Amino acid sequence: MPPPAHTKGFTAPPRAVFATNPDLSRGRLHAESPSATRTEFQRDRDRIIHSDAFRRLKQKTQVFVAHEGDHYRTRLTHSLEVSQIARTVARVLGLDEDLAEVLALAHDIGHPPFGHAGETALNEVMKQYDGFDHNAQALRVLTKLERKYPKFDGLNLTWETLEGVIKHNGPLVTPDKPLEDLPAAFRDYEALQSLELDTFAGPEAQVAALADDIAYNNHDILDGVRAGMLDIDDLLDIPLTGDVLRAVRAEFPALEHDRVLAEMVRRLIGIWTRDLISEFQTRAALAKPGSVEEVRALERPLAAFSDDLLEKQKPLREFLFNRMYRHPKVNRMMSQARRVVRELFGLYFAEPEALPAPWRERANAADAMKRARIVCDYIAGMTDTYAIDEHRRLFNLERWV
């Protein structure tokens, strides 16, 4: 039997004039010899993948606590899905795929255990100690807390990667928010190397940020239905998902439930992705940036969703918020998570002897401000399951019996 005929597939366009060029990178804070086998951004990607903080994302979650089940997404699997979408979009737009990938892989690296509940709790207990912000924590992880190299702390990533990680959602310094109002991590690093916090990030970072939106908007649908919090038929009443679900069922009337759900989500990701590509191309054609520096200097980002899609996704976001993110089961889990974080912080701060070495030595030698940050760093690095187990070890006296 002859092999099936194939039509010509996708051909990548040439590099865009405003794409970030690894050969023109602004370099690293600590000078290093270039790699003979990888570009600067490929090297950054590999450092992220081999980092302890990235590996711990396998048991950190956003909506569900990690021990709830094996089929729900963790921040690790989510980051891999974001990187796939970001690479695809970057390839179509002629951007640097490797930079888009490393920024997607690193975008959640500063998150504490238990998602937004853990962040809220850490920010509360750190209120008088400069607070907690996952974006600032990402900068701490990448420049201080990862300790693998003999000559420097952190991963010594390129300027473009650090800039993209912390500015992926837009400028941090604005007329209403001066540098002095930002967390200390930003202020401290700015004294070492300016990341130009008052401008937009490069195009690859902008694409990675919206790839994140595409991934969690659609994959949360899948996880919500699997968890029993959502019914697939509920999605028929929402314009965007309803149209796609009806089309899948019309085309495949005998298809089983799980495949219908997967096909619907696959098509929805396609809709969001094509819209991002189209809107980016429209904005780029209007702005005509001639370099990545001109992209940073624009008054609005190049990467965005169209007004039409933004309007269509509003009912879906509201539906997910009310039916999933505020589901009684999730509320109970998040209440427990906040209590775990608060109680762990209180105990470690009052009794640093409970910390493992070398955290214990650093905390014992520090004043209150520095001790609080050391304890915060330790808790922020925990996985969901480790935080739960550590809380049980420290507070459940029945385990002594």
Image (cartoon, rainbow, N blue to C red):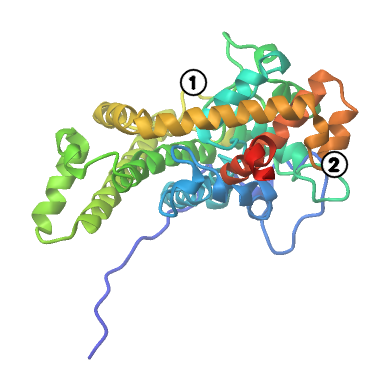
Q: Is residue 74 visible?
A: no
Given residues 87 and 244, the one toward you in this image is 244
Which mark is on residue 71? none
Q: Position of residue 136 (x, y in %)?
A: 65, 28
**In the image, residue 118 above or below residue 223:** above
Within-10-Å neighbours for mark 2: few <14, some 14–19, many 20+: few
SS state under label 1: loop
Looking at the rendered image, the quarter that the N terminus falls into is bottom left
Label 1: how many residues lie within 10 Å, few (<14), some (14-19) or many (20+)? few
Camera-near label (2 vs 1) is: 2
Q: Amino acid at mark 2?
A: Pro
Q: Residue furthest front?
A: 401
Q: Is residue 149 above or below residue 294?
A: below
Residue 310's spot in the image, x, y percent?
A: 30, 28
Which labelled disc corresponds to residue 358? 2
Is residue 371 among what the camera can see? yes
Q: Amino acid at mark 1?
A: Glu
In this view of the protein, which residue sits in the foreground, 338 or 316? 338
Estimate the spatial distance between the alpha carbons at disc 2 and disc 1, rounded to whole Å. 46 Å
Location of the C terminus (image quadrant)? top right
Residue bearing mark 1: 299
